[in-house]
Image (cartoon, grey):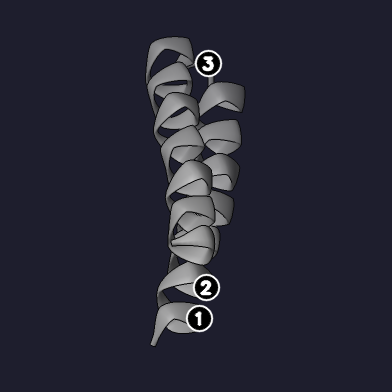
Amino acid sequence: MNWILIGIALYLTYYTFTYARKVWSDNNKPAGLALLMLSGCYLPLSLYLHFR
């Protein structure tokens, strides 16, 4: 079960990062920056779940 949660957290990191790049390139810099910061939250979550 733990590997499924780690996989979901890593997928959310990838998805929000790619979406942030798309929004950033559409000249919506504040929203792109907010999404980039959000995508950075999932990587520590996956590391926490892995080493817990």
Instruction: Of the two numbered discs 3 and 1 on the same chain, state the one appearing first in sequence.
Output: 1
Q: Residue furthest top?
A: 30
Q: Nearer the viewer, mark 3 or mark 1?
A: 1
Mark 2 element type: helix
**Frontmost residue, 15 versus 43:** 43
Percent of width and height locating residue 2: 42, 79
**Alpha-carbon neighbours of circle 3 within 10 Å: few (<14), some, or many (≥20)?**
few
- Name which residue lies at 47% across and 18% down: 33
Mark 3 element type: loop
Kindly report the distance in space between the C-alpha atoms of the residues bearing marks 3 and 2. Answer: 31 Å
| Amino acid type, mark 3 | Asn
Q: Which residue is mark 1?
A: 3
- Name which residue lies at 53% across and 60% down: 51
Tag 3 and tag 2, C-beta contact below 8 Å: no
User: Which label sits on residue 39?
Assistant: none
- Name which residue lies at 42% across and 37% down: 41
Instruction: Of the two numbered discs 3 and 2 on the same chain, state the one appearing first in sequence.
Output: 2
Q: Is residue 51 left or right of residue 38?
A: right
| Amino acid type, mark 2 | Gly
Kindly report the distance in space between the C-alpha atoms of the residues bearing marks 3 and 1. Answer: 37 Å
Q: Quadrant of the C terminus?
A: bottom left
| Amino acid type, mark 1 | Trp
**Frontmost residue, 47 versus 13:** 47
Kindly report the distance in space between the C-alpha atoms of the residues bearing marks 2 and 1. Answer: 6 Å
Mark 1 element type: helix
User: Which label sits on residue 27?
Assistant: 3
